[in-house]
Amino acid sequence: MPLPARAQALYAPTWSSLDQRPVPAWFTEAKFGIFIHWGVYSVPAYRPVSPRPYETYAEWYGADVYGNPALRQSFHNKNYGPSFTYRDFGPLFRAELFDPARWADLFARAGARYVVLTAKHHDGYCLWPTTAPYKQDWNSAAVGPHRDLVGELAQAVRARHLKMGLYYSLLEWESTPTSRRPSGYYLPPADVARHQIPESQYVAQNSLYQLKELVTRYQPALLFADGEWDYPATYWRSPEFLAWLYNYAPNKDEVVVNDRWGQGTRGQHGGYYTSEYASDDAHVGPAHAWEESRGMGESYGFNRAENINDYRTSAQLVQQLIAIVSRGGNLLLNIGPAADGTIPVLMQERLLDIGQWLAVNGEAIYGTHAWAPPGAPLPGPQPPALYYTAKGRDVYVLAPRWPPAAFVVAGVPARRHPTVTLLGSPVPVKCRRRRGQFLIQPPALTPAQVPSPFAYVFKVHNALP
């Protein structure tokens, strides 16, 4: 699939040109999306729980089978046998209970505005009937469900008026060329030889081919590239692909891309910047569009080794959403469905709890931007008592806990006389000036009058010039 030479007419295949493209507005307004890690790794659905999240990622099971002797001996060989390869899990990934309409309904009820599915993770297994020459026997139409999982979910998600995005891993443990590959979690030579794509063909006939295939067939509103870290962007031909995407793709005006397009591009080039399990880092802020992704527990793929103590509560997840949005970011909250296509009930409950909170308080999240009182920094590693967002002339004060007394909202000009409401409540909220400061007095509420659990939002109407 050669890229048109005329792609240089608008955006040139250089970072200096590509980085000038604005991030489409829908993304920075959406604020909340659902990430889905689902694939062959959902069959074993296991990795030992670790204090460090990236060591708990169950979707890395394929790398562990071949590159982690300790796990292979302690779990894989014991439960599946020493001759059972990772590809042997493929026929067991059946998705027999997968109902895309039910998934989409859940995501809509959760208050999400976009969905990102792992079309292909590092194991190389594709969730669509790819025509790429080296993937004819390793996709969901040929092995396992015998369905186009990407297409079915995209149709259902769009029917609920949500944006559909796709994750795509550039590298593959089985077949990424070995000439410059560092040692680590990759297949040993004997297994590489069985499935490896010739280095001269890997990008043109696999990664680049499939990226164009996904774009032209499904027209995703978002592309989340990953697995870029071993090679520079020129190796992946990423600038060339992005120039084609921005200039000629059928979804060129809508599509949003991230920053994982080659070694050293994170936080430097591409579209929005990404973090994972790191949104409290001081460098993450509103200067550039960004998104934090994380699981409800410590894994992205479903991990049977996790228990309820490893999962964040609904209150913690709502407060993470607030903290991230108050810094100008988006939250891409991950779920890990089971191999049969069901979403664990605990994950469903968390999503519905978030949705119920957003149904009352969503105007303080969607379409807002980061705001802080003059002289005050945006929230950092230590959570503040209050968070702020703004939209138009209104300021939203988000309190993870009910304020016990009157509190000051700095930065409201003395010449303005705003009113204050509590989102979801008809109970009046008193406000006043004292010594030049603007104060809000929380009303006394009975338990029945509390508008929503987890966090409370005071809207300061007409607070800004």
Image (cartoon, grey):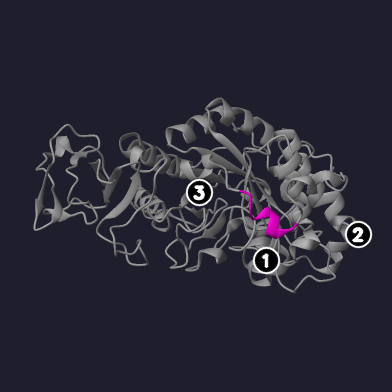
Between the C-alphas of marks 2 and 3, the distance is 35 Å
Q: Are marks 2 and 1 in contact (CB under 8 Å)?
A: no
Residue 321 x, y percent position in the rendering: 40, 50
Nearer the observer: mark 3 or 1; the answer is: 3
Secondary element type, mark 3: strand
Q: Is residue 454 visible?
A: no
Q: Which residue is mark 3?
A: 332
Query: Residue at 43% of width from left, 58% of height from top?
Result: 310
Residue 404 x, y percent position in the rendering: 13, 54
Q: Which residue is mark 1?
A: 72
Q: Which residue is mark 2?
A: 200
Between the C-alphas of marks 2 and 1, the distance is 32 Å
Tell me the tag on residue 232: none
Secondary element type, mark 2: helix
Say left or right for 209 vs 184: right
Q: Nearer the viewer, residue 9 or 257?
A: 9
Q: Which residues are drawn in magenta?
A: 14-21
- Asked if residue 438 is among those painted magenta in the image, a careful observer would answer no
Q: Quadrant of residue 236?
A: bottom right
